[in-house]
Image (tube, helix red, strand yellow):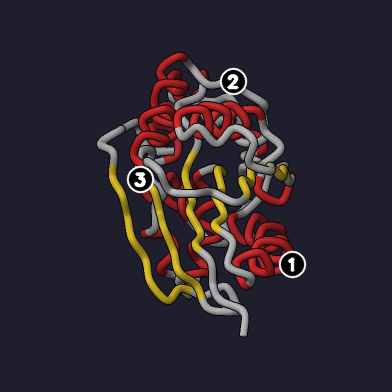
Amino acid sequence: MSKSGKLIIIRHGESEWNARGVWTGTTDIHLTENGHQQARVLGQALGQLKITRAVGSEQVRTHETLDELLDVMQQVSVPRTYSAALNERDYGIYTGKNKWEVKAQIGEEAFQDLRRGWDHAVPNGETLKAVYERSIPYYLATIVPWLNVGETILIVAHGNSIRSLQKYIESVSDDAIGEVEMLFGDILIYQVDHEGRMQDKEIISTGITLPPA
């Protein structure tokens, strides 16, 4: 019988637009110097854990985070796979806008719906539900089969693509997903069943903090 591997999920380090407090979404923005250092801290927190495969989105901030992580872990030769299925949510008309200025304009309730709601429409953009509908088929078709043969998979993705994975893995309801936030500096480590659902969860917190996305 095949055995379940280990799934590690990390959010990329601080990007240039994170530092400015604006919504980045699908815009391809590099890490700041602080973001590169954060990625190295995350690699140090993982220590000698042997990674068999690394997975990122197609956006450069996950590539740069993986470069730093795997360099610190002395595992730069680990096979890597990149997929648009794990790209950040498209924030449509809000892309490039300052989050806290938007909050002042639209009010607290609408702001929270925009940031965390499951199916809250964004003009010219994506809902979290839409992110889920692209990320979970990829997870089930690609990641879960690797886990089912005992691999240790490291995923570096974005706040919302990670939240979509958490929703499936942890069986979070549509209403409750609004309370789930993947923080910078946290490392999620899962043992999952053969359908990719959580059996055990560990959180490693490095103390890295940034304003919430």
* 61 in relation to 126, above or below: above
- Crowd tier of the residue under label 3, counting other residues whose Cα lies within 10 Å: few below 14, some 14–19, many 20 or above: some
What's the amino acid at mark 1? Ala
Return the residue nearer the eye: 153 or 195.
Answer: 153
The answer to whether marks 3 and 2 mark residues whose Cβ atoms lie closer than 8 Å is no
The answer to whether marks 1 and 2 mark residues whose Cβ atoms lie closer than 8 Å is no
What's the amino acid at mark 2? His
At mark 2, the secondary structure is loop
Residue 110's spot in the image, x, y percent? 44, 48
At mark 3, the secondary structure is strand
Residue located beneath label 2 in the image: 30
Residue at (44% x, 38% y) in the render: 213
Earlier-in-chain disc, 3 versus 2: 2
Return the residue nearer the eye: 110 or 135.
Answer: 135
Residue located beneath label 3 in the image: 186
Residue at (74% x, 45% y) in the render: 84
